[in-house]
Amino acid sequence: MNAIFLICTFLVFLILPIILIVGLIKPTWIIPIKINIKNRRMLIFFGTLFLFILFAIIGGNNSPDLDVKENEKGPAVSQDTISIPIDSAILIAYKTQFDSLYVKLMRLDSIDDMRNSRSKLHGQIQNLLFNEWWGAIEQFDSLSRNVEISKAVYYQCARKYDKEYARFMVYGDEDEEMIRFWAESESKRILKKLVRDPKSLKVENVKVNGKTKKGWNCTVVYRATNGFGGYVREYKNLTMAYDIDNTLYKCISMQ
């Protein structure tokens, strides 16, 4: 019995977590491409979870300290014995994915990663947090399974992510070329209403100066005819804020 208990413990706490992590990151390593399955990650997650529970029951039934009565029917496994592997499985599966995506998001501050954008990574993180991870917690909560550890870590991750999402709502993808494009577009739209001869307006240069609390500070240099018919050169400072609903930048002030 001790040997069975040790084998099950080894599988539950070492082998299965490795299979789960590898399967969620590289699912084709566990289920080959030639096997036609649409959602490999979901199958790996629930398959690994099933094995967690199975080996937990077998290990618990063969534990040296487990007192089983002769007339008792079925394995003597408590609710907590089953809940711990479930909680661990959810935690390992989703916390690993969150950490990977969050690291990629933060790397964009120092590395120009052409494979990822802030909007893309924010979408992936939101889907993971608000659909997949929370959906799994709610599902097992409805089955009266104890997933308090995963739930506590989930809230920590959500609070951590909230700061980055608040940044995204103001500054967007932080792509200077895109900011410059919209600063020029917005300045033309506004200046045509201000200059004497809109047809004479010509934007010569747009510079992105950096961030403010409300958005991006930009300087626009332009030329237009004045009241004496002269072609004068002037500049305006714009504050460009991200419009998350329309995925573009809008001018919220001009000086």
Image: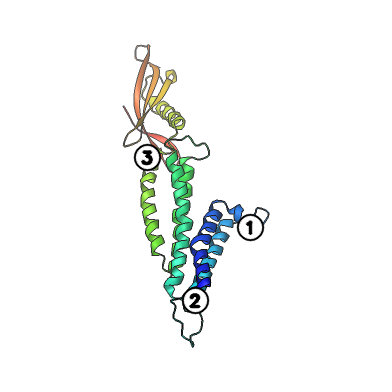
How many C-alpha atoms fall within 10 Å of the one at disc 1: few (<14), some, or many (≥20)?
A: few
**Which circle marks residue 37 in the picture?**
1
- Secondary structure beneath dot 3 equals helix
Q: Which residue lies furthest to the bottom in this view?
A: 71
Quarter-of-image position of residue 222:
top left
Is tag 2's residue or tag 3's residue first in the polypeptide sequence? 2
- Point out the tag, 2 or 1, that comes first from the N-terminus: 1
Dot 3, how many residues are within 10 Å of its Cα: few (below 14), some (14-19), or many (20+)?
Answer: many
Residue 243 drawn at (x, y percent): 41, 40
141 relative to 38, above or below: below
Q: Which mark is residue 61?
A: 2
Tell me, yes or no, if residue 131 can be seen here: no
**Closer to the camera, 142 or 51?**
51
Instruction: State the image coordinates of residue 165 (x, y, percent, origin top left).
Output: 39, 45
Q: In this rendered view, identify the residue nearer to me: 101 or 218.
A: 101
At horizontal 49% and vertical 87% (from top left) the residue drawn is 70
Say which residue label 3 marks.
170
Q: What residue type is labelled 2?
A: Asn
Q: Closer to us: mark 2 or mark 3? A: 2
Q: Distance between the residues labelled 2 and 3?
A: 56 Å
User: Residue drawn 52% across and 57% down?
Assistant: 18
